[in-house]
């Protein structure tokens, strides 16, 4: 009994330590965002201020970077989600041995260091755009960042969508065909709605991965900037509590997102529990009916 | 010339791929089979193929090949590229071992290379040790609600980007940072400890950056393990560490391999932690590559170094997978 | 409108494995036709060939006289009810039912009206806005039928549609299905491994085993005059006595079995010397001696009282016991366990069939 308690306490202690490690630095950083000294310090707390947020707002490069980051994030969604969808459908339809080669090619970007993806993207598009005379359109930081990031983010999307696609019941497709639907109709009416949750998660993951990417972007962005590359420059030059203020905003948005997600999930669960209840009631009514009137 | 080759190789791969598909279709005759275009409709079929082709060719295969190709070229100004001076050469690779300026052994770069790989391996083991208990607890012992909360707690910090996370660690570890304040306040040390200079910051930063990447594969692998197996082992009187060594870990091997591979690759290729948390004298290999691009403007040499790093990482990962008898397919799930 | 369906020497192979071999038969329009056979015998394969999801390796399917080769599943005048129903979980009941009409381009108001008609037909009025997950098993079953009927197919194919239901509900649905078939008057092709279902509902039954159609006949014939050893042993209970024919005449044949010579009908005119199996159903056996060549003597292994009937198990020649079923009235004089008893039958109720595979118990 007492050894049980000790184990429980040890586990509790370990979990506290783990999350302390995870959150501690972020909490300290958040405190510095509200402290007055110009060097970010959590202690001693000399006075409360929101000035760093104002400073952040007035930081032009950072705001330009933010706009670019959002554009790139949207671009990455537009490229990698359709690509991931197409790739998972192709993956699902090809034969066994051809599939392993295909798998290797499509998933290799996940394991490749981001730096290398960035470099290879820049080198390739420099020559390719020159060769095809499309340099003014293609050889741009934003375009290359989208391409470079999409190369591995599309693989994330592939994996997310694939996981759901594997749970697709082929009988659904056949049922629709049997009722006269054409193959494209099956895709739009049956498969796509089924994949919708996966497509949404893939989009969210794609945007977040793009938004926070540094290794690939720092090469692919060329002379342009994103929020993260501006941040990197700032950190390299020294530190200011304005960065902490940015972190506070990001953490705030994350928490709001997490809470919204949790609320949505709970709502869904309640709904499906309600449906299951209804089904159970109907089941009982059926049985009663079958007993009373066996004709 | 070599550029032409680069454009030819993908076609070769496609041809092999088609041949394989054809061969299998021939020999695994299946009356339920429908051709790709029949199953998706012509228009959708073409769209799918085009998207996949664009991705695999223009975003993955061609850039890789191009980078490799570039590493076999001399450093030239744009005007000379494709001209008579543009010959294939191994000089970039040679320069990794021997300084081109004075012919001496290139100790700094070789050291940085080894240092990066060894530290990455160490960080991988450290993260495994930190994450395994948590993953096990979440998968086997925790209630559903608790697990969901823990999950969120794990994910939320990772929505803050890598740079800011490194920045937050720097606030903790800097000489005027909180940890030094505490150490000095408690009288444990007299002066500030230079955590960043002695690379403690780098190690902590790398470990911190990739905790999540380790927890999730481990959790997924352990989660599907039948609890009864552990119960059975416990009933047989196995001590707790044997249960983990003989039951849980062998079962979770693919997840462990997956987590370790990811952490190792990410850490060997990381840029932020060494740049912002490494000591001023520390040379991380990716930082060298970075400098070739942004300071020396020597792209071919940067490409050669990048390729060396990639090759070494792949070789090491393959070796480990072979040693632990896990297939690559199991790893990426 | 109903259509007749013809299978013309259909063979389906999966790689090396032959799932259906040389199946030929004709199903008349408006008929309730069943395929009956053990699990894995190729029933679903045949159904999927008719509906167009499988291309036969050889042979052709004709529906209403038209060769279906090269015509896709979505262009055939058939509708299939899947083993797991395959309702669309993200659509409401009404959307499910009218999906076939939607892809045919019918407008929304017409669809709505048609959905209401069909919901009335399956006794789920005004439930169109529910989600599939809110329905009971039996209701889902009926929605699947309505969805298939909505496209007005000429042939309805049903793949073990009742197997997922509760036993009581299954009996109820049997009657309902038969009633629906008579109301809409189209051809039903029904698959089952449950002989009760096949016997009660069908006009004609095809009994299958290992990809081969063993017999096509109405239920009574399949039971009373099975054509092969497999059918005799698969449909209903039966006691097999394998041996060799020693005498064949107009009245029947005599088979030399482990229990001595036994007589039975010989509908296939087997000749003396041929290996054969004599079948006697448990309810055809009665206690007590009879003619010399219709009497079996063996030790009583067990007696089981079951209320309306009792079963006596005698030691058989092989692993399988000989079963005898006696009605309520006779159950007073049941033999005791352990004694040696004689049982006999009317020579007319014994059936001599050529040697062949028996159904596994
Ligand atoms: N796509 C396939 N590839 C290989 N073999 C198959 C395939 N589909 C079916 N089979 C095999 O063909 C045989 C017949 O299968 P089928 O599904 O027609 O059986 P069934 O009579 O419907 O059985 P059940 O009552 O279990 O549904 C089985 O042995 C099955 O293993
Ligand atoms: Mg079947």
Image (cartoon, rainbow, N blue to C red):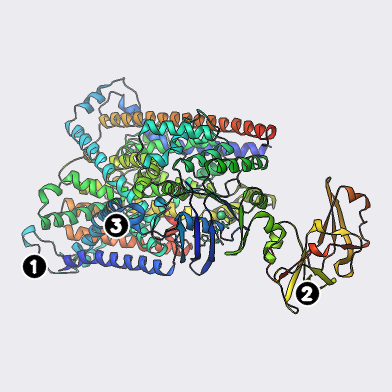
Q: Circle 3: is it few (<14), some (14-19), or many (20+) Cα within 10 Å?
A: some
- Chain hosting mark 1: B
In the image, residue C252 sits, relative to residue B194, either above or below, namely below
Q: Nearer the viewer, residue A195 or A244?
A: A195
Mark 1 Cβ inside 8 Å of ligand 1? no
Residue B98 visible in the snapshot: no
Q: Which residue is mark 1?
A: B85
Q: Residue at x 15, y 46 (%)?
A: A140
Q: Which residue is mark 2?
A: C249
Query: Residue A224's spot in the image, x, y percent?
Result: 16, 42
Q: Circle 1: is it few (<14), some (14-19), or many (20+) Cα within 10 Å?
A: few
Mark 1 vs mark 2: same chain? no
- Chain hosting mark 3: B
Query: Residue B287's spot in the image, x, y percent?
Result: 25, 51
How far apart are the alpha carbons under marks 2 and 3?
101 Å
Mark closer to the chain start, 3 or 1: 1
Q: Badges 3 and 1: C-beta atoms under 8 Å apart?
A: no
Q: Which residue is mark 3?
A: B112
Q: Nearer the viewer, residue C9 or A98?
A: C9
Mark 3 vs mark 1: same chain? yes
Which quadrant of the structure image shows residue C221? bottom right
**Quick one: which residue is furthest to the bottom in this view?**
C273
Q: Viewer-nearest of labels 3 and 1?
A: 1
Q: Nearer the viewer, residue B24 or A76?
A: B24
Q: Provide the secondary structure element on which disc 3 rests.
A: helix
Mark 2 Cβ inside 8 Å of ligand 1? no
């Amino acid at each position: 009994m007492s050894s049980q308690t000790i184990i429980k306490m040890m586990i509790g202690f370990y979990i506290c330590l783990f999350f302390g490690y995870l959150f501690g630095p972020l909490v300290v950083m958040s405190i510095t965002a509200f402290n007055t000294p110009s060097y970010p310090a959590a202690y001693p707390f000399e006075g409360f201020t929101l000035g760093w947020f104002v400073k952040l707002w007035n930081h032009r490069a950072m705001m330009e970077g933010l706009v670019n980051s959002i554009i790139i994030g949207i671009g990455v969604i537009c490229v990698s989600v359709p690509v991931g969808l197409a790739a998972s459908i192709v993956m699902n339809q090809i034969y066994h041995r051809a599939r392993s080669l295909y798998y290797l090619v499509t998933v290799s970007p996940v394991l490749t260091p981001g730096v290398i993806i960035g470099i290879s993207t820049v080198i390739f598009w420099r020559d390719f755009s020159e060769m095809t005379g499309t340099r003014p359109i293609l050889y741009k930081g934003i375009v290359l960042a989208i391409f470079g990031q999409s190369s591995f983010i599309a693989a994330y999307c592939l994996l997310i969508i694939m996981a759901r696609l594997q749970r697709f019941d082929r009988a659904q497709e056949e049922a629709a065909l049997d009722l006269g639907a054409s193959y494209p109709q099956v895709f739009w009416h049956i498969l796509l709605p089924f994949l919708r949750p996966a497509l949404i998660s893939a989009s969210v993951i794609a945007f977040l991965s793009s938004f926070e990417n540094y290794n690939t972007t720092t090469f692919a962005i060329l002379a342009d900037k994103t929020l993260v590359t501006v941040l990197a420059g700032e950190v390299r030059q020294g530190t200011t509590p304005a960065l902490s203020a940015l972190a506070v905003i990001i953490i705030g948005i994350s928490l709001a997102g997490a809470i919204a997600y949790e609320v949505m999930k709970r709502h869904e669960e309640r709904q499906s529990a309600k449906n299951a209840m209804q089904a159970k009631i109907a089941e009982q009514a059926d049985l009663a009916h079958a007993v009373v009137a066996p004709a | 010339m070599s550029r032409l080759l680069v454009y030819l190789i993908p076609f070769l791969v496609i041809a092999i791929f088609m041949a394989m598909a054809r061969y299998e279709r021939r020999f695994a005759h299946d009356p339920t089979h429908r051709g790709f275009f029949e199953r998706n409709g012509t228009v959708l079929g073409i769209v799918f193929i085009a998207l996949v082709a664009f991705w695999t060719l223009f975003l993955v295969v061609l850039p890789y090949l191009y980078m490799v190709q570039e590493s076999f070229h001399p450093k030239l100004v744009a005007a000379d590229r494709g001209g008579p001076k543009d010959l294939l050469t191994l000089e970039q690779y040679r320069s990794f071992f021997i300084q081109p300026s004075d012919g001496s052994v290139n100790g700094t770069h070789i050291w940085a290379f080894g240092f990066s790989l060894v530290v990455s391996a160490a960080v991988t083991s450290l993260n495994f040790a930190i994450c395994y208990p948590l993953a096990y607890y979440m998968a086997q012992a925790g209630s559903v609600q608790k697990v969901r909360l823990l999950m969120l707690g794990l994910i939320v910090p990772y929505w803050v980007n890598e740079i800011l996370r490194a920045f937050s660690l720097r606030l903790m570890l800097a000489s005027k940072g909180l940890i030094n304040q505490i150490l000095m306040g408690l009288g444990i040390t007299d002066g500030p400890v230079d955590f960043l200079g002695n690379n403690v910051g780098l190690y902590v930063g790398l470990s911190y950056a990739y905790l999540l990447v380790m927890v999730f594969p481990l959790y997924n692998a352990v989660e599907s393990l039948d609890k009864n197996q552990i119960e059975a082992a416990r009933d047989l009187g196995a001590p707790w560490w044997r249960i983990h060594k003989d039951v849980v870990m062998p079962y979770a091997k693919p997840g462990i391999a997956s987590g370790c591979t990811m952490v190792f690759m990410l850490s060997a290729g990381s840029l932020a932690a060494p740049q912002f948390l490494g000591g001023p004298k520390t040379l991380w290999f990716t930082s060298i590559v970075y400098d070739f691009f942004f300071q020396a403007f020597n792209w071919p040499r940067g490409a050669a170094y990048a390729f060396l790093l990639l090759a070494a990482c792949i070789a090491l990962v393959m070796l480990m997978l072979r040693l632990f008898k896990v297939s690559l397919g199991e790893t990426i799930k | 409108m109903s259509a007749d369906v013809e299978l013309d020497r259909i063979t389906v192979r999966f790689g090396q494995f032959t799932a259906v071999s040389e199946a030929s038969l004709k199903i008349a329009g408006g008929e309730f036709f069943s395929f009956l056979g053990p699990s894995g015998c190729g029933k679903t394969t045949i159904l999927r060939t008719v509906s167009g999801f499988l291309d036969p390796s050889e042979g052709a399917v004709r529906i209403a006289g038209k060769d279906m080769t090269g015509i896709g599943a979505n262009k055939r005048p058939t509708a299939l009810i899947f083993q797991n129903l395959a309702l669309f979980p993200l659509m409401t009941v009404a959307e499910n039912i009218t999906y076939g009409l939607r892809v045919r381009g019918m407008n929304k108001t017409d669809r709505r009206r048609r959905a209401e008609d069909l919901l009335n037909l399956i006794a789920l009025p005004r439930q169109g806005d529910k989600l599939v997950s809110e329905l009971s098993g039996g209701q889902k079953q009926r929605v699947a039928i309505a969805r298939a009927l909505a496209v007005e197919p000429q042939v309805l194919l049903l793949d073990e549609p009742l197997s997922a239901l509760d036993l009581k509900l299954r009996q109820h649905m049997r009657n309902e299905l038969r009633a629906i078939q008579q109301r809409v008057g189209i051809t039903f092709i029904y698959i089952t491994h449950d002989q009760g279902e096949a016997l009660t509902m069908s006009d004609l039954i095809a009994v299958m085993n290992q990809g081969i159609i063993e017999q096509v006949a109405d239920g009574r014939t399949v039971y009373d005059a099975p054509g092969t050893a497999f059918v005799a042993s698969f449909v209903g209970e039966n006691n097999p006595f394998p041996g060799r024919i020693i005498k064949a005449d107009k009245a029947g044949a005599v088979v030399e079995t482990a229990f001595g010579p036994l007589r039975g009908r010989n509908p296939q005119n087997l000749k003396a010397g041929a290996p054969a199996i004599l079948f006697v159903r448990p309810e055809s056996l009665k206690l007590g001696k009879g003619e010399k060549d219709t009497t079996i003597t063996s030790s009583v292994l067990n007696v089981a009282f079951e209320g309306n009937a009792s079963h006596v198990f005698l030691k058989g020649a092989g692993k399988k016991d000989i079963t005898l079923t006696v009605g309520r009235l006779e159950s007073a004089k049941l033999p005791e366990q352990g004694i040696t008893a004689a049982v006999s039958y009317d020579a007319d109720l014994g059936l001599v069939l050529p040697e062949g595979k028996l159904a596994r118990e």
